């Protein structure tokens, strides 16, 4: 049984504002800083249609909460949407409509029923398009940058390898993200004064009160945000006539085999950097822009720890990467702490630094899981450790789940041996780092400590 949207949600874009009407009334403001305005002096009408669709999808995903129903344990939604576009004939064409529907269903786990209607006139844009002049080396690709550890370690590894030709794009769906990324990258430029410059652009998506005025009224899973990120990167790449967009995500996080059987089919397991999703979005956006565009994962064959390990030769890079933000609790309100220390993202972060034998400052965490502290609800930690142990023991259940995930998530094109070796290396890291951890005591505030490195 699926939750039914009471009526069709109409999506309209005008002058930086996406409006939803029907079932829920909501406005989403799209803003961009000066550099992005310069890049996109006069985007095509099709690009503006795409922005309307992507931002509308994101707003609907956030404002239509998944049902909490014993008859619909996965929280699957049926979402009826009508997008107002300049070129309805193109979007109504079977190829475009089917590709969009397939992509959204795959990404969110929901049923999307999309339709299109014509605008009264073209989208507003500048009357003059001027080429953007770069000061220095022209970028060869767009790279999404979120300010998390994978973004920081991935980009730092690219710089160490001598690749400086990136235009980093931050899509700030939360208020603090853009400033965090700007600060991180300003610090990095200060460390690399002799290195040719890279570029950073950003735009933000901000709700204008309405249903989404308070976080508790929003849907927390936010599965559709990856579509907004990728469409934003695609529009920038199209404006610069670039053919590659990179995502700095480790392979285990990208493939993301669920910890439970139910995660294979519901919308609660993220697929935002999944190879299957990126394959679909590459085909979709290539058809939109009429030229090849490829979304790539340069660290698909790396664990997070291996990405961090690549920075050890330059200690200043390790120190800089510590300034990344991983915690899912973005509103953490503990003085002097940026990470809770016990959410899934924090656990992966702690493992990455430990397994890489890299120093980190434990004072950044509200809870130190390596100092006899553990979450009050240890279910995730136990499942995480148990999955690693089953993988190393060649347990039939986990290998069967892996195979079903491989088929259901459209990654049959990945070499099986490569992916299985990746998961084996990751499982060994989990066992080595967390294998002796005692899980159970309640959360307590950690003692202030210096930089910590004590591998078990």
Image (cartoon, helix red, strand yellow):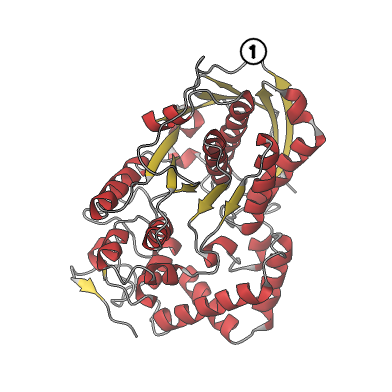
Height in image: 21 above or below 395?
Answer: above
Q: Is residue 110 visible?
A: no
Residue drawn at x 34%, y 64% is 341
Residue drawn at x 66%, y 23% is 84
Q: Is residue 132 visible?
A: yes
Residue in the foreground of this view, choosing between 383 and 19: 19
Q: Position of residue 300 (x, y in %)?
A: 55, 64
Residue drawn at x 72%, y 68% is 404
Q: Which residue is mark 1?
A: 121
Residue in the foreground of this view, choosing between 306 and 349: 306
Q: Outermost residue toward the top?
A: 120
Locate residue 422: give its quadrant.
bottom right
Q: Position of residue 265 (x, y in %)?
A: 69, 58
Q: Outermost residue toward the front?
A: 136
Q: Residues within 10 Å of mark 1 (few under 14, many from 20)?
A: few
Residue in the foreground of this view, choosing between 128 and 444: 128
Helix or strand or loop: what does disc 1 sit on?
loop
| Left or right of residue 12, residue 218 in this image | left
Height in image: 175 above or below 372?
Answer: above
Q: Position of residue 158 (x, y in %)?
A: 42, 59
Height in image: 455 above or below 173?
Answer: below
Locate residue 44: give its quadrant.
top right
Query: Which quarter of the figure is the C terminus placed in?
Result: bottom left
């Amino acid at each position: 049984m699926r939750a039914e949207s009471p009526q069709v949600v109409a999506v309209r874009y005008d002058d930086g504002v996406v409006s939803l009407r029907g079932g829920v009334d909501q406005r989403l403001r799209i803003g961009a800083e000066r550099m992005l305005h310069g890049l996109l002096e006069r985007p095509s009408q099709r690009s503006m249609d795409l922005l309307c669709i992507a931002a509308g999808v994101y707003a609907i995903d956030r404002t239509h909460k998944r049902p909490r129903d014993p008859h619909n344990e996965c929280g699957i939604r049926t979402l009826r949407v009508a997008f107002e576009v300049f070129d309805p004939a193109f979007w109504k064409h079977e190829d475009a409509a089917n590709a969009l529907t397939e992509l959204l269903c795959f990404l969110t786990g929901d049923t999307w029923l999309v339709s299109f209607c014509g605008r009264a006139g073209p989208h507003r844009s500048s009357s003059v398009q001027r080429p953007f002049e770069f000061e220095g080396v022209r970028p060869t690709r767009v790279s999404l940058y979120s300010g998390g550890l994978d973004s920081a370690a991935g980009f730092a590894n690219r710089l160490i390898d001598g690749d400086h030709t990136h235009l980093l794009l931050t899509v700030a769906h939360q208020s603090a993200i853009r400033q965090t990324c700007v600060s991180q990258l300003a610090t990095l430029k200060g460390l690399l004064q002799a290195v040719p410059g890279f570029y950073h652009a950003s735009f933000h998506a901000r709700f204008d009160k309405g249903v989404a005025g308070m976080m508790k009224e929003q849907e927390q899973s936010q599965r559709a945000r990856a579509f907004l990120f990728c469409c934003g990167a695609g529009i920038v790449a199209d404006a610069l006539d670039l053919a590659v967009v990179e995502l700095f995500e480790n392979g285990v996080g990208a493939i993301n085999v669920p910890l439970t059987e139910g995660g294979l089919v519901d919308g609660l397991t993220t697929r935002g950097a999944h190879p299957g999703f990126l394959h679909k979005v590459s085909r979709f956006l290539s058809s939109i822009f009429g030229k090849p565009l490829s979304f790539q994962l340069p660290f698909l064959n790396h664990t997070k720890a291996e990405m961090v390990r690549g920075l050890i030769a330059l200690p200043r890079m390790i120190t800089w990467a510590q300034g990344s933000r991983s915690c899912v609790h973005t509103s953490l309100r503990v003085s002097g702490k940026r990470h809770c220390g016990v959410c899934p993202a924090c656990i992966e972060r702690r493992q990455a630094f430990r397994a890489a034998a890299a120093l980190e400052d434990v004072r950044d965490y509200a809870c130190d899981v390596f100092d006899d502290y553990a979450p009050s609800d240890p279910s995730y930690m136990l499942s995480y450790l148990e999955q690693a142990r089953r993988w190393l023991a060649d347990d039939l259940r986990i290998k069967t789940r892996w195979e079903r995930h491989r088929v259901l998530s459209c990654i049959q094109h990945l070499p099986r041996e490569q992916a299985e070796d990746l998961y084996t290396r990751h499982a060994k890291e989990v066992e080595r780092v967390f294998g002796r951890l005692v899980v159970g005591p309640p959360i307590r505030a950690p003692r202030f400590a210096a930089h910590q490195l004590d591998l078990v």
